Every structure is written in structure tokens, then in C-alpha cells.
Amino acid sequence: MTITETPRASGSPTAAGSAPVEQRWTPRLWGVLGVLCAVLFLDGLDVSMVGVALPSIGTELGLSTTSLQWIVNGYVLGYGGLLLLGGRTADLLGRRRVFLIALAVFAVASLVGGLVDNGPLLIVTRFVKGLAAAFTAPTALSILTTTFHEGPARNRALSVFSVFGASGYSSGLILGGLLTSFGWRWTFLTPVPLAILALVAGLALIPKDRPADGGGHDVVGAVTLTAGMLLAVYTVVSAPERGWLDPLTIGSVLLAVALLAAFLITENRVRHPLIRLGILRIGSIVRANLSVVALFGSYLSFQFMMTLYLQDVLRWSPLKMALALLPAGLIVAFGSPFVGRLIDRYGTSRLILASMTSLSLGYVWFIATAGNTPHYAFTVLPTMLLLGGGFAFGFSSIMAQATDGIDDSEQGLASGLVQTSGQVGAALVLAAVTALVAGGTHGGGDFGQFHAGVNLVTAVAVVGLALNVVPLLLRRREPALAS
């Protein structure tokens, strides 16, 4: 890859030791970004397409509702539980190698999933795909943040990157509705040729990188963290059905806490820890990780409720439902390219604050206007526009804040950490919302059973807003006190 500057060891490229040097965007640089965006697009496409196809899968394979949920949750378990390990493995073994191997595994698992006639085996392929995504996602982001220099170039690349994530999810909703009419297997098989094309392009374009010098493998930390995360996600997913006071649920919670505590103890004692805990002392990094929980947790949970409401209550077709939710995805797709320039001008903190404000206003508007039977034009559409704006402002800004100032050798760690926070946080919020919806009253109109879930989603967004507005207020207060 040809760029105008010598690659840095860390930080931003500088001229005369201080001013950032502009990075020239060569065709190969665009090609690398294209490969990374294609893989993020595939992740979003796969998740939404399979979600639309679940009823058809259950009918053909004779799966109950409980079994069907594991087609989604199997992916979440593999993805959310292994993200940190995936990011750190990329730092230690080489980002290009890990990225390409994981992408090949994703393609094979997609092919097998589209050919099987056995429910449990289908769930296994979903877990394997989640595992592969746990390595491709943080590795793709760390390749991006080490290829594009911190500052305008990286912010621009992150904006383009986020467009493809939103476009993949939105396209998957529509494409899933169309493909399901020909057979649910096409929702599994369609990503295969796309993944193969991305793999070939990645082999040709992504430059080789060297593993971290002097790094070691924290086997105990990896085992305790992965087991603890998997068990925690499994507990959150299964507890609403089993019951939070069930002995097995309580035992799972205690064991997950014990494993995560063992991980923290290990990280303070080993020579080459999986996570340098000192990274959690950086206030901006912590706020970015908490903000992504509020963003993903509230946004995905609200879309989940809208999907149930529009299909199960109003009896809309999958394609009509997808078109109803599409405005939010379009706002993200067309708005995200401009976020990089806004970050350069206003900084990540203000953009994240704008994101949390837009999200909170969207949910508050829905609560204020929904009543017992929400109308699409007056309630749902304005809400989706506000949520789309919130996601567009928030995703790129949070990712930039989560990796700013981090040494190149730990970019995989920082990338994996923020994405883990988003996935696991979304699983936690969605599990709580699902429990509230399942236990909600069916009285008080068509939307009655969803009211408690919407209230929780709103509370999550408001907490995210508070986490970001307080530091800004304190920073403004300090100069006033000093004067």
C-alpha cells in the first residue's frame, strides 16, 4: 500500500513533531476500505435476513419457538462471547491472517447452513458464524484504524465503514423478505459468493503485517474471559424463559461472576495480559463503551419490538414491515458519510451527545404519541427518523472515541472492547425487554404488551445521554471556577 508518509508506531502522523500530515487516498487504500466495508455489510446482511426467515425455517424443519430463538442467539453467543479474544488474537498473530481465516470460516458455515436439514446442526452453524464474526469484526476495525491515520483520514474512513453496516442491515431486511418467498435457504446461501469475493480481494489488497513484538498468549485469561462471557450471555438469553430465580439461572450467574473475577485477577498477575486493565482508566474510553451499550441496546431492542408489533399484531408481511423500518437505515446510510467532517469540526464528545439526545427524543416522542394503537405517519415514522439520526451521529463518533490515542499494538484490543460492549449490552437490554414484553398485558389496545419494554428502552437511552452530558458540563464549569 502506497501512502505519502512513513507508517507510525503509534498516534497520529506528524509534521515537525506536532501537526497531523494529510494522508493520500490511493486506489489501493480505497480497495482495502472496500474489503473491510464488504465484510461489515455481510455481517449486517446475514443477521437481518435470517431474522426475516425464521418463521419459514421453523415450518420446514419443525422447530418450536424456543428452538428458533437459538438460531439468532447462537450467533450472539459466538459473537459477543469471543469478540475480545478475536481482537487480541489479531494483534498477536497478525491482523491480515486472522481476518482472512475468519472470513473463510464464515463462508463455509454459511454454505453448510444453507444445505442442512437438521435444526441442531443449523444452530451450530450459526454459532460458528458468530465465532467467525467475532474475529472479522474487531480485526476489520483494527485494520482500518492502523491503515488510516488518526484524525481526518480515520474519521472519514469510519464514516464510510459505518454506512455499510447500516446498509447491510437495511438491505438484509428487504432482501430477506424477497428471498424467503423463494425459500429460506437462499438467506444462508446468498452471503457465500460475496464472502468469497471479499476473501480474494483481501488476499490481493490487504498489506501483510507483523504480529506484535514480544507479545505472549494469556491462555488462562482467554479461557476465563471467554467462558465467563459465553455463560453470561447464555444466562441473559435463557433466563426470561426459565425464570431469574430458577436455581440453574442463579447458579449460572454466580459461575459467570466467578469466571470473570478470575479473569480480572489473572490480568493483574500475568506478564502478557489479554487486556491491559489500565485502558479502563481512560475516561473517554469508558464513556465510549457505555455509550455503545445505550446505542445498540436501545436501538436494536426497539426494532425488535416493532418487528413483533407490525408482523404479529398488525399482520404485515415481512417486506412491508421492512419498508416501514427502512427510514432509519436510510438516514444512517446517507448521513454517516458526513459524520467524519462533523467529528473533525466539533469533536466526538459533542457528536455522541447529539446522538444520545436524538435517540432519547425519539423514544420520548413514541411514548407521548403512541397511545393504545400507534399510527405510522404520526408516531412510528418520526420516531424512526430520530433514531436513524441518533445512530448516524453515534456509531462513527463512538468508534473514533474508543480508539483515539490508543497505540497501534492495542488497536485490536480497543476495537474488540467497544464492539463487545455493544453486542453484550444489546443482549442484556434485549433480554430484559423480551421478558417485559412476554409478561406484558394484552389489554389497553394493540400495543399494550409493549409499553413496559418501550419504557425500559427509553430509560437506557436517557442514561446514555446523562453519561455524556455530565462530563461536558463539568468541563465548562472548571474554567468558570478557575476565573
Image (tube, rainbow, N blue to C red):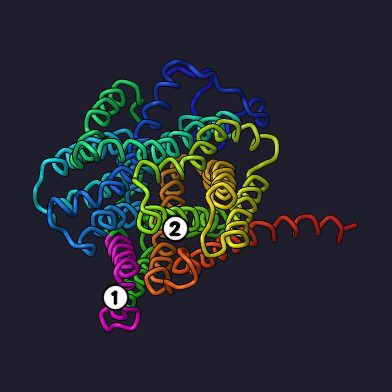
Kind of residue indicated by mark 2: Ser
Hey, which quadrant is residue 396 in on the image?
top right
Magenta stretch containing residue 233, yes or no? Answer: yes
Residue 252: assigned label:
1
Question: Which stretch is magenta?
Answer: 223-252
Residue 334 location, x and y as percent?
54, 32
Magenta stretch containing residue 172, yes or no? Answer: no
Which of the pair 79/203 is nearer the observer?
79
Kind of residue indicated by mark 1: Ser
Q: Is 291 displayed left or right of 38 in the figure?
A: right
Q: Residue at x 36, y 53 (%)?
A: 315
Residue 319 location, x and y as percent?
36, 41
Mark 1 or 2, which is nearer the eye?
2
Quadrant for the N terminus in the image = top left
Of mark 1 and mark 2, the one earlier in the sequence is 1
Residue 253 location, x and y as percent?
33, 76
Which of the pair 307/154 is nearer the observer?
307
Quick one: SS at disc 2?
A: helix
What residue is disc 2 on? 301
Hey, which quadrant is residue 180 in on the image?
top left
Q: Is 186 displayed left or right of 264 in the figure?
A: left
Can residue 120 be seen by looking at this rendering? no
Against 267, is 146 above or below? above
Dot 2, how many residues are within 10 Å of its Cα: few (below 14), some (14-19), or many (20+)?
many
Against 348, is 342 above or below? above
Question: Which residue is outermost to the left?
Answer: 117
Can residue 126 be seen by looking at this rendering? yes
Residue 81 location, x and y as percent?
32, 57
Quick one: SS at disc 1?
A: helix
Q: Is 184 displayed left or right of 212 in the figure?
A: left
Q: Residue at x 28, y 54 (%)?
A: 72
Distance Cα–Cα, label 1 vs label 2: 24 Å
